[in-house]
Image: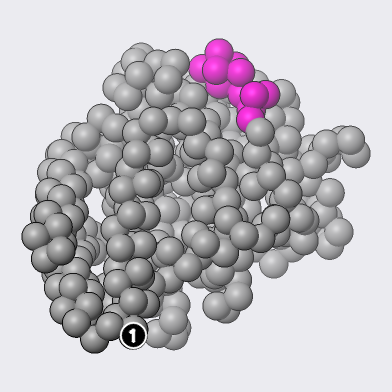
Amino acid sequence: MIQLTVIIIASYALFILFLIKGWQTQVKNTVKFDAISTPNYEKVSIIIPCRNEEYSIEGLLKELKVVYQYHPLLEIICVDDHSTDSTAKKIKNFQYVNYVALPIHKEGKKAAITEGILHATGNIIILIDADCIPQIHWFNAMIVPFTDDKIRMVCGWVKMQPKATIFEELVALEFSTLIAFSAAMNGLKLPVLCNGASLAFRKDSFEQVGGYNSDITQSGDDVFLLHKFKAKFGADAIHYMLNALAAVETPVPQSMAAFLRQRIRWVKKSLKYRDKTTIYVSLFMMFIHLWLLVWFIVSFFNFSYWFIFGLSWMGKTIIDILWMGTFAKAISPKNWKWFIIPLSVVHWLYVPLIAIISWIIPSSTWKGRILKNG
């Protein structure tokens, strides 16, 4: 059993080495841009799907006003997904923003994005979540890769806003591992994940892949679209803008319950993945975490198994620290070093537990809605 444990940990170490290589490649290959001048581009449409965002939408639209003033070939479209608060009223206070109400027979983020695209006159579509704040040069950074005709999609860098508690610091660092993983896999020409909080693509390419028409999940407006673009146009058509000037900031889940709801929603949609690379990587990572969980449990019944668990846990923890140390300085909280070890200690435990919970419960929730099919 010790030999098998060593083989499993060695396999995990090899996988992480590939990720480190992918990360370094992506950093090297990220398109450089002039933060001052604007590249030549076609008309661009920024689409913001909204639902009950009265506390955040004004902050985003004020930031985008600066972008709008300097880029005449730009339109901003807010699509209201049946908000029950004052979101619509606040959007209408911004004269340069096109307000679109989602028809009564439609609902959900995918429907809101699709409705926004129907109203869009630009051939480059940029998506940003209503509760995010973009960096000052985010717009330029997101459109410059499209000067290359082969690029069909640009995945933006998303990071969590400044943190106030230890819990928030841990969540922010954990979130950064997902962003780094996404970028690293893209660097390996194996894109599997992206984040809809900052995502851009060509409108005609969206139409060519059928948009969200064939989707069987209510969530996953980003990942499933990425998979469609990869299947249709190939990995070379997808670019990851790994540049601090291209980042948008998203809020940290304010409680453990909010964090768990978010992660359960993310895991539930993974059950509908059809992209083989994504499935294989997900299964491998889940196996590693379940291996640790199983040995942790059985160790309480047989003391001799504690050595197997300890060897596995130490091996994974050391490997994770090396991996996070590769990217954390660039995309994680400033004091990330203090949180790498605590996160590595608990990561193996909550990942499989969240997965198990997501498999058991029949639905997840988002913005007051029940998502029965992920």
Location of residue 211 with respect to 111 vertically, above or below: above
Residue nearest the observer in this picture, 27 or 372? 372
Which SS class for mark 1?
A: loop
For the point 60% across and 75% down, the residue is 257
Q: x, y (%) of residue 3?
A: 9, 60
User: Where on the picture, by quarter, is residue 203?
Assistant: top right
- Specify start and end residues of the magenta stretch as a single range: 203-215
Q: Residue 115 lies in what quarter of the image?
A: top right
Is residue 138 visible in the rendered image? The answer is yes
Quadrant placement of the N terminus: bottom left
Q: How is the image coloured?
A: one colour
Residue annotated with mark 1: 300
Q: Is residue 214 magenta?
A: yes
Q: Residue at x 70, y 55 (%)?
A: 363
Along the line of sight, the residue nearer the viewer: 212 or 354: 354
Q: On the rendered structure, is 214 left or right of 288?
A: right
Q: Quadrant of residue 104?
A: top right
Q: Looking at the picture, which amino acid does disc 1 mark?
A: Phe
Q: Is residue 103 left or right of residue 79?
A: right
**In front of the other: 217 or 92:** 217
Indicate the position of residue 89 as horizontal and vertical percent values: 83, 55
